[in-house]
Amino acid sequence: MSSKQDALKRAAAEKALELVQDGMLLGLGSGSTARYFTEGVGRLVASGMKLRCVPSSRATAELAAELGIPIVQELLGAIDLAVDGADEVDPNLNLIKGRGGALFREKIVAAASKRFVVVVDESKLVKHLGVDALPVEVSPFLWRTTAERLIALGSSLTFITDNGNLILDLTFDGGIDSPVGLATAIKVTPGVVEHGLFVEMTDTCIVAGPAGPRMLGRSAVARHETGPDSGRGPKGRH
Ligand code: 5RP
């Protein structure tokens, strides 16, 4: 990663820190962009803000513990604000996530949040999802059978996740035509634990480019711009 891209990731994450308020329960994402957000939350806690968090991966949990951010183990009620990175973001703010292997917990955290904010540098914006691989987490039990079913939809590679499951990376020639349809087709495949399509879940996307970070809200995706408070809405179930 270039230092320029790294600076943009940091700028997006810093912008998201402006949304944090005293007393909030935060969902902490995974990956290099989300790490900047977690580090910022650590600074807010050190300065006296009362915050608690639900980390979305082992790595984030370790970082949060090092930074002294109180971690919630059992969730009662909703997360106030979850902030996470993404691998691809389409114009409807649908996402591919999980190339870092943490998609299972990331999706639960996003779905449990009142507001799900995605932080990216502008290289993550795509016209159609599926420019690169879509990770799908599957149970190791009879996983080759699951893979055969999924191969009808793409091609695959594997690695092990935090949960001890396998990831199949599906690639699609020409990209993904219908994220909603594909999300459903993958989800109903026996053996699939979770997939990296986050459809209709993003409330706000903070995109950092050379002109600075800007906020895109789901309610205003048609024009691809909005103010900081827009974009609240119910989560999709994909
Ligand atoms: C991990 C993720 C990450 O958020 C995604 O891979 C983006 O990572 P980065 O911020 O390092 O580019 O989904 O499972």
Image (cartoon, grey):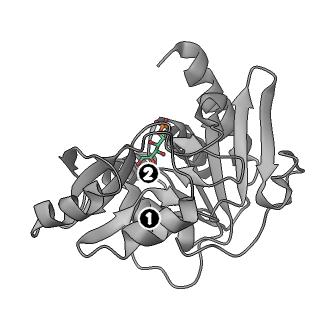
Residue 213: give x, y in percent of width and height: 77, 33
Q: Which residue is mark 2?
A: 64
Q: Is residue 140 visible?
A: no
| Element at label 2 | helix
Q: Amino acid at mark 2?
A: Ala
Is 210 drawn above or below residue 142 in the view shown? Answer: above
Q: Amino acid at mark 1?
A: Ile
Q: Identify the residue at the far top of this view.
A: 3
Residue 163: give x, y in percent of width and height: 23, 62
Q: Identify the residue at the far bottom of this view.
A: 76
Side (left or right) of 98 relative to 112 = left
Q: Count the marks: how many? A: 2
Quadrant housing residue 27: bottom right
Residue 200: give x, y in percent of width and height: 64, 65
- Is 58 in front, or is 215? 215
Residue drawn at 26 percent across, 55 percent down: 151
Of mark 2 and mark 1, the one earlier in the sequence is 2
Tag 2–tag 1 contact (CB < 8 Å) = yes
Q: Which residue is mark 1?
A: 71
Cα–Cα gap, marks 2 and 1: 7 Å
- Is 80 in front, or is 149? 149
Is 185 drawn above or below residue 5 in the view shown? Answer: below
